[in-house]
Amino acid sequence: MLSAYPACFIKEENGYSVIFPDLNDLATCGNTLDEALAMAVDCLAGYLYWLQKDGETFPKPSTPNEINIAKIAEELEVSSENAFINIVTVDVAAYAKTHFEKSVKKTLTIPAWLNTAALEQNINFSQVLQEALMSKLHLQ
C-alpha cells in the first residue's frame, strides 16, 4: 500500500532540508534535490515502518495547502523564498523488504574451542552476533 505525506523542501546554502510536518517535524536533508528526495523517501519509510512495528496508527496526512511553509521556515530561521511542498510517497512493506528486513550473509572466524563450547550450549551464532552488534552500536 502506498503512503503519501507532504514534505517541506527548503533550499539552504549547502543543500536541502526536508521536514514532514505531519510526522512530529521528522526531518532529513540532502546535498542535492535528488539526494534530498531519496533521503525523504528513506526517512518516511523508516518512520512509518517503526510506527507499524510498534502497533501505532499512521497519522493522517495534511493536504499541501494546509501547511504553512513560511512558518516552518521561520521556525528554522531560514528563508522560505526557495522552499516548496512536495508529496513524498513510499510503499512501506516493499521498501522494508529491500532496506530494513533483508538479511546478508557474513563469514566470520572464531577459535575452534569457542565454536565447540558454543555448539555444546546450542548457541545461535546469528542471534548472538546481531545482539552484540546492536549493543555495540547502541541500538538497544
Image (tube, helix red, strand yellow):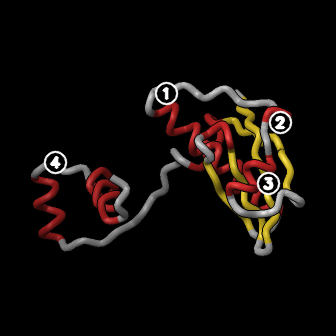
Give above or below for 8 relative to 81: above
Q: Which residue is mark 2?
A: 64
**Precedes in sequence: disc 1 or disc 4:** 1
**Precedes in sequence: disc 4 or disc 2:** 2
**Precedes in sequence: disc 4 or disc 3:** 3
Say which amino acid is labelled 4: Asn
Q: Which residue is mark 1?
A: 56
**Precedes in sequence: disc 2 or disc 1:** 1
Q: Residue shown at 86%/50% (left/top)?
A: 84
Left or right: 68 in relation to 39 = right
Q: CA distance from mark 3 to mark 2?
A: 12 Å
Q: CA distance from mark 1 to mark 4?
A: 36 Å
Say which amino acid is labelled 1: Glu
Find residue 79 and report its image quarter: bottom right
Percent across and percent down for residue 139 are 37, 56
For residue 76, say whether it is visible: yes
The disc label shown at residue 122, or none: 4
Percent across and percent down for residue 44 are 65, 44
Say which amino acid is labelled 3: Phe
Mark 2: secondary structure: helix
Give above or below for 69 relative to 31: above
Q: Which residue is mark 3?
A: 9
Q: Tell us which disc is closer to us: 4 or 2.
A: 2
